[in-house]
């Protein structure tokens, strides 16, 4: 059994309305200017994602980008998106939306907060982007 809660971080003002981007204070970028992600880095990260995991808050399962990874137009678009995020220090506004699901650890025991385990679903493209940043930090630091 699971309960569903939706959480969203709202910006008080958006300066870049057409691209739906906002400043994200939790995004820490290296100085002075980060190098853009390469198509090969993105392809590697998409391919290593676990297909048995649930879809993200966007409803998109990783198997769809995995199927499109051989499409040059798709990979260029994703590379452009990630490069824009890195260079501008902004992420799409919708990437801040998450879904928190509470799962019962043991259904045989009475239900209380001690027996619930939360899991958070984030947007699939954000997950890949965060993994790219993490691998850079691990490689450089």
Image (cartoon, grey):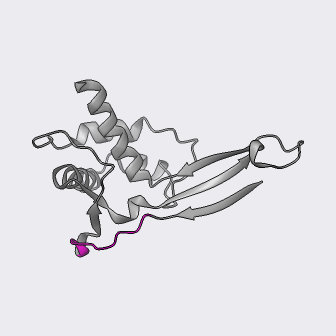
Numbered disc total: 0
Counting from the top left corner in percent of width and height, residue 47 is at: 40, 38
**Looking at this view, is 70 or 44 the one in front?**
44
Q: Is residue 64 magenta?
A: no
Q: Quadrant of the C terminus?
A: top left
Residue drawn at x 29%, y 55% as measured from the top left: 74
Asked where in the image residue 133 lies, by quadrant, the reply is top left
Q: Main secondary structure of the magenta part?
A: loop
Quarter the N terminus occupies = bottom right
**Is residue 10 within the magenta segment?**
yes
Which residue is pictured at 16% across the width and 51% down the height? 87
Q: Residue at x 71, y 59 (%)?
A: 3
133 or 27: nearer the viewer: 27
Measured as percent of width and height from the top left, residue 109 is found at 88, 42
Q: Is residue 18 toward the left or the right of residue 98 in the image?
A: left
Per the rendered image, the range of residues in magenta is 9-17
């Amino acid at each position: 059994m699971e309960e569903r809660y939706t959480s969203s971080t709202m910006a008080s003002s958006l300066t870049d309305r057409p691209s739906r981007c906002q400043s994200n204070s939790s995004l820490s970028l290296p100085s002075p200017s980060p190098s853009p992600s390469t198509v090969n880095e993105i392809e590697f990260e998409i391919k290593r994602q676990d297909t048995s995991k649930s879809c993200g808050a966007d409803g998109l399962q990783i198997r769809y980008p995995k199927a499109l990874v051989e499409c040059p137009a798709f990979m260029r678009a994703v590379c452009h998106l990630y490069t824009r995020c890195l260079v501008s220090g902004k992420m799409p506004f919708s990437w801040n939306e998450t879904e928190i699901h509470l799962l019962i650890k043991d259904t045989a025991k009475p239900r209380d907060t001690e027996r619930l385990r939360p899991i958070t679903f984030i947007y699939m493209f954000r997950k890949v982007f965060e993994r790219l940043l993490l691998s850079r930090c691990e490689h450089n630091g």
